[in-house]
Amino acid sequence: MDRGAIAVVLAHAERTLDPDIVIATVQHALGGEGFTAQDVSIVLADHATVLDLNRAWLDHDCTTDVLSFNLDEDALAEGFVEGEVYVDLDTAAERAPEFGTTFDAEALRYVVHGVLHLVGYDDATPDEKAAMHALEDRYLHNTPKGT
């Protein structure tokens, strides 16, 4: 589903999220950070897809919850984002009970986390992780449901 400059790609055989809610969440997080989507794709994928990308592009031989690829770093200076976010819906389903949340809420957390990476946030240190988690909470607790 494509809405303006945000596309939601359903690439999982069994799991999905409501594309309207994904788009609203992305718009909310980008807007809150002062950015506009120029061309953003949110790919709702499975373990195998995300693992293959993690191996090919980051040389990491492990699963992960989300991968982000900023396709135009220069656009950030102008307030625009062009990139791809790959969300592992299998990981969201597996980890949601661990955090006492729903599948949808966990998967949307990965969407926001990926978007925050697109706009320049990192989570390499404990302080950076805490800052990103606080932003995730902020955008998830105040996201309009649907558009």
Image: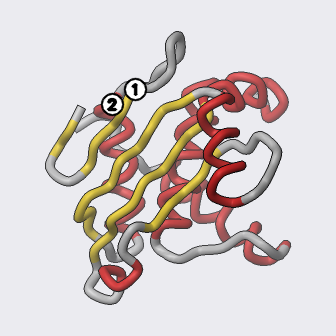
In this picture the colour scheme is: secondary structure
SS for tag 2? helix
Q: Gap between marks 2 and 1, in whole Å?
A: 9 Å
Which quadrant of the rendered structure holds the C terminus? top left
User: Crowding at label 2, few (<14), some or many (≥20) Cα neighbours within 10 Å?
Assistant: many
**Left or right placement of residue 100 versus residue 109 in this view:** right
Q: Which numbered tag is attached to residue 19?
A: 2
**Front residue of 14 and 95:** 14
- Is 126 displayed left or right of 8 in the figure? right
- Residue at the extreme front of the image, as rendered: 56
- Residue 45 on image: x %, y %: 53, 30
Q: Position of residue 40 (x, y in %)?
A: 32, 55
Q: Position of residue 72 (x, y in %)?
A: 36, 74
Asked if labels 1 and 2 touch by Cβ distance under 8 angstroms, the answer is yes
Residue 119 place in picture, x, y as percent: 46, 72
Residue furthest toward the top? 14
Q: Is residue 32 above or below residue 56?
A: below
Between tags 2 and 1, which lies in front?
1
- Crowding near pointer 1: few (<14 within 10 Å), some, many (20+)? some
Numbered circle sitting on residue 10: 1
Q: Sequence-wise, which precedes: disc 2 or disc 1?
A: 1
Q: At numbered mark 1, what does the secondary structure look like: helix, strand or loop?
A: strand
> Which amino acid type corresponds to the residue marked 2 in the rendered image?
Pro
Residue lying at 73% horizontally and 28% vertically, measured from the top left: 96
